[in-house]
Image: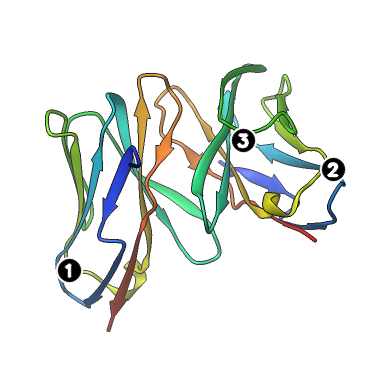
Amino acid sequence: KAGVTQTPRYLIKTRGQQVTLSCSPISGHRSVSWYQQTPGQGLQFLFEYFSETQRNKGNFPGRFSGRQFSNSRSEMNVSTLELGDSALYLCASSASTETQYFGPGTRLLVL
Amino acid sequence: KNEVEQSPQNLTAQEGEFITINCSYSVGISALHWLQQHPGGGIVSLFMLSSGKKKHGRLIATINIQEKHSSLHITASHPRDSAVYICAVRPNTDKLIFGTGTRLQVFP
């Protein structure tokens, strides 16, 4: 089975712009979670989707949003980018066993 | 105080040594995860525990629910084990909370 894929892998944006990141889960996995990793804050939970419904949301401002499609692929969007949004954004998928399988991440740099 | 504390923050070892990384948490949980992150960012899920002990190759993970504590052991450590090891707990509210990680370097 192919693993979790994330696109793009690297991205450079400027303050005020918006960005959309994509995640394709392992085939058959219906749960997709998103995480942000920064040197200062470490790994933090953003959101979790299951069968197109947001099941959980972390403590991030409304500029961070996401969605999941009927084929379980997920996107997350960050609007009005700030310098502090520079981070590694990780997506993970899971089936009913709850073990999470992580993608390689998208490294976002905001200038 | 963080809800998930890991120790030590940094660890160096000689090849072949037995290594222990500790994780303490302060909330009720349904599961605890141990993750491995290599330079470059990729994360691999090593274990998911809700009780007892699990073993996979040279890696052993234990959890004591009453004491809210888990340990990750690496036997016969090897330079390829060099990575950041992250403990994460899933409280009953269902959002994963992560520790700050333990950076392990194993020298030949």
CA distance for labels 2 and 3: 23 Å
Question: What's the amino acid at mark 3?
Answer: Pro
Pinpoint the chain carrying mark 2.
A
Point 72% across, 35% down: residue: A76
Question: What's the amino acid at mark 2?
Answer: Gln
* Nearer to me, B8 or B88: B8
Q: Do labels 3 and 1 touch, CB within 8 Å?
A: no
* Nearer to me, A71 or A46: A46
What label sits on residue A18 in the rendered view?
2
Q: Secondary structure at mark 3?
A: loop
Same subunit: marks 1 and 2 = no
CA distance for labels 3 and 1: 34 Å
Q: Secondary structure at mark 1?
A: loop
Pinpoint the chain carrying mark 1.
B
Q: Which residue is mark 1?
A: B76
Left or right: A43 with respect to A106? left
The percent position of residue B44, horizontal first and vertical second, equals 44, 50
What label sits on residue A34 in the rendered view?
none
**Mark earlier in primary sequence (2, 3):** 2
Question: What's the amino acid at mark 1?
Answer: Ala
Pinpoint the chain carrying mark 3.
A
